[in-house]
Structure formats: structure tokens, C-alpha cells
Amino acid sequence: MDTLAPLVLLLPLAGFLVNAFFGRVLPRQVAGWVGAGSIGLAFLAALAILTQVVGGQRLDQTYFTWWQTADFNLPFNLYVDPVSTLMILVITGVGFLIHLYSIGYMAEDPGFARFFAYMNLFVFSMLLLVLSGNFVWLIIGWAGVGLSSYLLIGFWYQRTSAVLAARKAFVMNTIGDVGMVFAAFLVFLNLRVLDYHDVFSRIHQLPKGGAVITAICLLLLIGAVAKSAQLPLHTWLPDAMEGPTPVSALIHAATMVTAGVYLIARMHSLYDWAPAAATTVAIIGGVTAFFAATIGMAQVDIKRILAYSTMSQIGYMFLAVGIGAYAAGMFHFMTHAFFKALLFMAAGNVIHAFHDDQDIRHMGNLRAGMPITFWTFLIGTLSITGFPLITAGFWSKDEIIRAAISAAGSEFWLGVIALITAGLTGFYMFRLFFIAFGWEWLSRDERHLHEAVPIQTVPIIILAVGAVVGGFIPVGNFLQPVFGHAVEVGAAAFWGLAALSVLVALVGFGFAYLLYARRPELAVQWRTRIAPIHTLVEHKYYVDELYDRVFVRPGFALARFLNDIVEPKVIDGAVDGVAHLWVEEARELRLIQSGRVRTYGIFTLGGAVGVLLLVTYFLGYLPVKPA
Amino acid sequence: MPVPAYTFLVLSGLLFTMGAVGFLVRRNPLVVFMCIELMLNAVNLAFAAESRYLNSLDGVVFAFLVITVAAAEVVVGIAIIVQVYRSGRQMDVDQLDLMKE
């Protein structure tokens, strides 16, 4: 295992280097298969690691020491336990399928090799993030993920909107990075170590629930919130949909945005020691889940709806890890990776078929024109809405709702919010499905559509299988050595809650069916009746506008003030002032150059006499003696 | 009867003062020039006298150096004065202020 773990890490790095340096000269097919193949091989290595981890092996191996001082050294060590194993399996597995899909999706793009270089860099950073055994390499991976996300969102750099979205994502992520760095500072200041193993074993030296541990956990939470697009640092994710669709699938659905969930699960011994911070995580998660779901109900851009549903689902995961149901959060992470990557890639096929039009109201005739995409998208929709028993989403989401509702105290209400959100999810996902995929039931649609090529449909079919059977993977048992036993509830409560959540989702589905499939005129009527609320939700609660007023515009104003006032007046003024002073002085001084020899003679003589007097004075030959 | 050293220094001082005053008050370039020579030679006299009294050749060597510099200076200076005279300017150092700022 001590060679397999670095192999998982180095294969995507090798793919990145090959495509970054030789991508321009390689044939397209080679560049694409280098990109996808390196991830595929890394997946095989991750599978080999899985067999050993199931066998009970762990790894905390130092490969080299980055730098060292007398009483502190910083190793490069990899940490493999069930949590990181689950992460690398999903990252490389789902990542491989998305790379395959990209070979087809990006086939016409002039930046083909550059795309795969960025994608491999992303996968490498993400793997470094989850495999790192100490805070410093975690932060390096964390920042690398932010960088490659920036590069990929701004991949079509000729578009202004893409560049702006990339910049926004980078700024938001940097806020989180600062939180991470300060958290690491605090850990080091108080414990003098940065190694996970040492930190986790020494953390109990700090007072439980004390200011230090709570501050560390809250700073880590800032990082997690920024990366996972939770309130209040969520605004970058919908804009990030400017990137190519495989990027949305890989980064903004399956892997990167779940880094925050991983972070909190990885640091669970810290959060267990800081209950207030953990509760904050749960509240942020619950509120975001509900908040994002309501926005998703009023959007018309297919990728944005999926982006808000991602925010909402990650809210579920935050809720889970916040109330201590870490295994449930990681379980939902895995199933979500399956069905959300599937939904995004299917949406990418649809967007291609409609020539880059992302408005769901313009779509239609998909069942006849693109049957594979249609049926797989339906499976993804059923899974995310929690269709009972046979979909993965049902099992993982119910586990979170169950954990929240059965918890005592305020978590109960978060569970209720999660339950309501399940209904909203049913509504907005089926609204999307009926409008985009089912329009032909209302008006005969004769548009002729082509199904995507096999390299784009096969990965989706594989993910569809995952979105169904993923719920039967015993993730909870696999993670039990790390997180301990999950909260058990009786069979009656189990099935009662399951029935309740299905019922709530069915209500959502029913409304969507009524408004968008059966009687669309009702949707128009209702929309006018609740016009103010609809506008509010459609504009995403005006959060972007609020940030624009509060942060962006004052920032610009400050910059303009510094540029127009401080720079020319204060800084240039000081420098120019010194120069002017000397010019003025020189203008008067140069008058002594009169050209008259006798004047010079007097100055010279006077100077000579002065020097002579001084010398004799200091040598003591004058009547006046020096002191 | 040996002549005391200070008499040479007094004479040197007198000659230098005459040269300096002449430099400052006269306006004919040639006379100004001669005053400079007078000052140089006053210093030479002091050098030579002290050299003799201190039984050291250093002062004499310095005097030779000054004589050489004075000779070179005369060559350049007289040439300039002659050129100025031939250009038809008034021979008055106060009027010759082409180098003023």
C-alpha cells in the first residue's frame, strides 16, 4: 500500500505534465486518452487500496521531509483510512467516467489538450487534498483545487462572463483558504504539531468546547463553506456553470464541492470536541439545503437548476456531519457523486443537442430523439428525489433525515427542514424534467435530435447503474472503524420516517406534475398570484445584489479613491515634492555662478581662510580654545 | 649669522597677500595672471625655506611640482588671454563673464 498510495497521486500528475507540455503536438486521441487513462489507472490503484483497507490495513507513511528545524519538522506523509479510500475511489472512479465523456464532449474544442491538462491537475490536487496526512499538504491540495477550478471555469477565456465567473469563484475560495491557513496556525500554536495523527491524539489536551478549539473548527468551517458553496459563500457555484459541462459534472457536483464535507468528516475528532462549532455546521447545512432548493424552483437554466440542487444536497451532507452522523454524510456524498455527475453529463448531451441553448423552456422531444439520455436522466432524477427502495438517493438521504430527526434538541428542527427540502427537491427536479424532457406531451414536437456518441452515453449508463445500486453499498460498515456506530432506530421508526419522506417527495412530485405536465395554465396563474415571492426567488433572494452593494461596489469605490486621490496626491505628491524642493533651492543657488572671476576668488580665499582658522582652532593655536 | 626661519615665512606671507589682494582688485587679465604667479611663488618660497630648515627635501620637491604646474598653467592661460584680446573684447575680467549661469 505504501507504493500504491503515491501511485494514485502521481498518475494524474503525470497525465497533467504530459498534456501541459506536449499537448499541442500530441494527436487529439492521444491527448484525450492520456488524460482519461491516467485517471483510469489511478482508479485501478485505488481499487487495490480498497481491498487492503477492507482487510484492515491503514497507512500513515512519511515519504520525505519537506523541511525541518530543531524542534519541528514538516513531513510529506500520506494518510489512508476508510474515509480517504472512499474519497479516492469516488474521485478517480467518477472522474474517470467524466474524462471519458469529455473525450466526446470536447471533441470539437480547440483547447482539447489544455482541457485535459487542467482536468488532470484538478484530480491530482483533489487526491492530494484527501490523501495528505498533515495540514500543510491539505492546504496545498485545497489551494490547488481552487486554482484548477478557476482555470476550468474560465476555460473559454474569450467569454467575458466565463472570466468573471472564474474570478468570482477564485475570490470566494480564497476567503475559505484564509480560514484554513488561520486554522492551521491556531493548531500549530496550541499543539506544536501539524500531523493528523499527532493533532488528533493531542486534541484532548485542549479544554472541550473551549475558545481555542471552537475557533479552530469555525475557521476550518469557513474553508469548508467556501469550497462547498454553502451559505453565505455560495454565490460562485451557479456562476461557475460557465465552464464546460464535464467540469460542472466533475468539480461542481461530484468532487470539489464535497471537499468541505470531507474536511469536516476528516476533522471529526476536532468537531466532536467543539459542539458549538458542530452545531453551526449543521445549521448552515440545513439552511442552505432549504434555501438553495427554493431558488432551484424558479430557475430556467438547466445547469443552474442542477447547481442549486448540488448546493442543496451538499447542505444535507453538512447537516449530517454537523450532527455527528459522519458516515451518513459520506454515504450521501458517494450516492450524490453518482447521480449528480449523471444528471450533469446527461444535461450536457441535451445542451449539445440544442446547440448550447441551456433554457429548459426551449427543450423537448427528448424521449424520442435521445432515448438513452432521457432514461438515464430520469433515473438520476428519481435517485435525487429519493424514489423508494430501488434508488441510491433514497437510502442515503433518509439516513441523514433519520439521524437529524432522532437527535434530541434543536437538531430535530433541522431534520424537519431537511424533510421539507425533500419535498422541494421532488418539485424542482420534476419541474425540470417535465419542462425540458416532457414538453412534447403538450405540443407535438417534430424537432429531430441526435443521440450523443457512445463515449458520452456509456459513462452515463454506468453512473445510472451506480445511482441505483449505490444505495446498497455498505458504506456505514466500511467507515465504522473511523466514525463508530451510527445511531440505531427501531424498525417501525425507520420505515415510518422513510414513508414520511417519500410522502413529502411525492407531494412535490405531484405539484410538479400538475403544474408542468397536466395543466400548465395553472402554473402561469399561480405565478402571477405569488408574483413578489416568485421574483424574489427567481433573483436568488438578491444575495448577489446585496454582496455587490456591500462588498464589491465599496471595494471599487475604495480602489478608485486610492487610484484617483491617494496615488497621485499622497504618494506621487511626496516624491514629486522632494524633487521640487531641490529644484527650487537650485534655482537660487545657481545665481552664484556669475562668471566673474573676482567673485570666485573671494569665495576661494574666504574658504581657504576659514579652513585655516578651523584647523588652527582645533589644533589649539588660537587664543580661543576648543572645549 | 643665520637668518631666522620666520623671516622667510613673513616674506612669503607678504608676497601671498600682495598676490591675493592684486587678484581681487585688479581687472586687467594679464595683471591678475601675474598675481596668481606671485601667490604660487610665495608658497614656493615657504616650501623651500622650510625644506632648508627642516633638513628635508620634501619641500623642495613640492616646490618643483608647483613650478611645473605654474609653467603649464601659464602656457594655457596666456594662450587664452591672447585669444580673448584678438577677438576684440575689452580686457576686463569683470566683463569676461561668458561662463555665467
Image: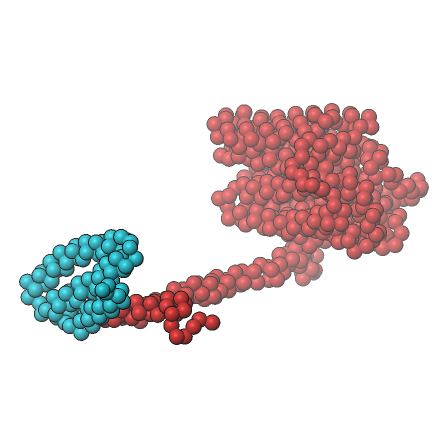
Q: In the picture, which quadrant includes the N terminus of chain A?
A: top right
In the image, B24: left or right of A350? left
Count the marks: how many? 0
Q: Quadrant of residue A86?
A: top right
Q: Is residue A625 above or below residue A551?
A: below
Q: What tint does the image give chain A?
A: red
- In the image shown, does B39 or A378 lie closer to the viewer? B39
Image coordinates for residue A144, horizontal then vertical, percent: 62, 40
Rendered residue at 79%/56% (across/down): A211
Kindly indicate the quadrant of the structure image that contains residue A118: top right
Q: Is residue A106 left or right of residue A278?
A: left
Hey, which residue is sitting farthest front in the picture? B1
Compared with residue A626, is residue A352 higher up or lower down, i.e. above or below? above
Taking the spot 51% from the left edge, 35% from the top edge, the residue there is A111
Q: Can the viewer see residue A448 in this picture?
A: no
Residue at x 27%, y 57% (from the top left corner)? B51
Q: Position of residue A192 (x, y in %)?
A: 74, 45
Give x and y (percent) for residue B40.
Answer: 21, 62
Nearest to the observer: residue A404 or residue B37: B37
The residue depicted at 79 percent of the width and 30 percent of the height is A58
Chain letter for the cyan part: B
Return the residue nearer the eye: B7 or B95.
B7
Examine the rendering and report whether any part of residue A58 can be seen: yes
Q: Relative to A102, does residue A149 appear above or below in the rendering?
A: below
Q: Horizontal and vertical percent for residue A380? A: 72, 37
Q: Is residue A329 left or right of residue A612?
A: right
